[in-house]
Image (cartoon, grey):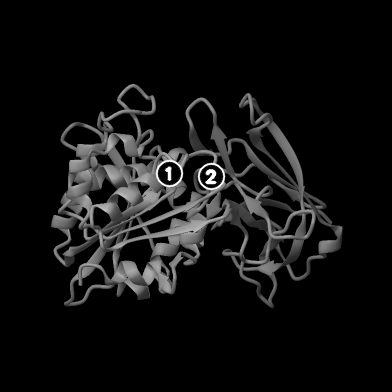
Amino acid sequence: MKHRGTQKVVVTGEDFGPAVKKTIIKLNQVIDLIDMNNLKVIEEKNGVLDEITGEEGIIRTEREIINAYISDEYGNKVNTASCYVAIELAISPSVGSPFIFHATTQLNNWCNPYRIYICGMDVNPDIDVEGDGKLCPQLDKWIMNSYKAVDGIKYAYGEYRPSSDDKKHPLVIWLHGLGEGGTDPSIDLLANKVTVLADVPFQKCMNQAYVLVPQCPTMWMDDGKGEYKSDTKDSIYTKSLFELIDCYVKENRDIDTNRIYIGGCSNGGYMTMEMLLHYPHYFAAAFPICEAYHDEYITDDQIDMIKHIPIWFTYAKTDHVIDYTLCTEPTVKRLLAAGASNVHVSVFDDVRDTTGLYKNEDGLPYIYNGHCSWIYWDNNECYDGNLNAWEWLGQQGN
């Protein structure tokens, strides 16, 4: 017997980005049994058909069903009759993303349309993943907000706030990569699994920190014309980003101004370096990842100006998006030559799955694009010898 129903999906941020792990179906009547053997799930969404040309079109994929059961409205399994059914779906680095990267705007967006057809049930396939058609458990700890700078630039941002007490708390600032610009900070938080910064392991290392995740409207390396800046000219966001950070610090008086940490990946790694170069005495430490600031545009005076800042660099040797031999590698050498005593580097041969969940056809761990070295940072796998990056960061400025 068929049942009419609607759907919401559960979206999580994974190492490889966001993924639809589950669909929750609300039926128009209560049932007490679901037979997953009679179900088939087809995902239909707009996606990139040709990575080279950027051509977009509709992609249909049969999704593997892991489990199906009677649930509550949040997709939790229940042992009583209910009008809700949850279907768990397999995900992988190539299956299940609700994002599309538009070649023209260089931004990630929620897929529209996004549909899940449940063969064997009469369910509306249309799901508003950009709006209220999703649940994102990892975002429950986060507050979405915005800030308009004096120059008129408006930033969306996500923030995590530690529990109120009588103590001072550090502030950790994360700056996103190229594709995460726009006006929806949930894209920023889920695309690079930034939500881990609010989870217990990271927060324990920080001794409970505020986390601020600003989102610029375009990209941090915007030269004002929508093009990548490639010289010593400042990003159009440099002054207003600092204005946002400083305003946030002043509004939250329990932030310890001696423990303000800044970092980010790719475009965000670039902007991390730009913040250090412009405001070298404001930040207690930095953690640029696969950063894109060309060393040739950093003067010897600037190296001398930032050599006192504790910095932890991360990159992979297979990064073909950012040339580390033009960015991180020479900058590290110059900092050390100038006498920097608290500079650390995590260099990886490549970027591969370390969870054991995803494998290549040969059965070996899945190999990611070498640019994605932020995966190691997110999973707390960055070391310099026996020194751990998260633990190191939490000790700076104390």
Which quadrant of the figure has residue 203?
bottom left
Q: Looking at this view, is 284 or 193 the one in front? A: 284
Q: Is residue 174 visible?
A: no
Q: Looking at this view, is 370 or 137 the one in front? A: 370
Disc 2 vs disc 1: which is toward the camera? Answer: 2
Q: CA distance from mark 2 to mark 1?
A: 11 Å
Q: Residues within 10 Å of mark 2 (few under 14, many from 20)?
A: many
Residue located at (61% from left, 27% from top): 54
Look at label 1 and name its amino acid. Ser
Measured from the top left, where is residue 280 in percent x and y? 18, 50
Q: Is residue 43 visible?
A: yes
| As drawn, 266 above or below 143 | above
- The residue tagged 2 is 319
Residue located at (30% from left, 45% from top): 273
| As drawn, 56 above or below 341 | above
Element class at badge 2: loop
Mark 2 or 1, nearer chain start: 1
Measured from the top left, where is residue 193 in percent x and y? 49, 56
Measured from the top left, where is residue 200 in percent x and y? 41, 73
Residue located at (56% from left, 57% from top): 14
Query: Where's the N terminus, which quadrant?
Result: bottom right
Look at label 2 and name its amino acid. Asp
Element class at badge 1: loop
Query: Where's the C terminus, which quadrant?
Result: bottom left
> In this image, 386 relative to 47: left or right?
left
Residue located at (49% from left, 45% from top): 131
- The residue tagged 1 is 266
Q: Residues within 10 Å of mark 1 (few under 14, many from 20)?
A: many
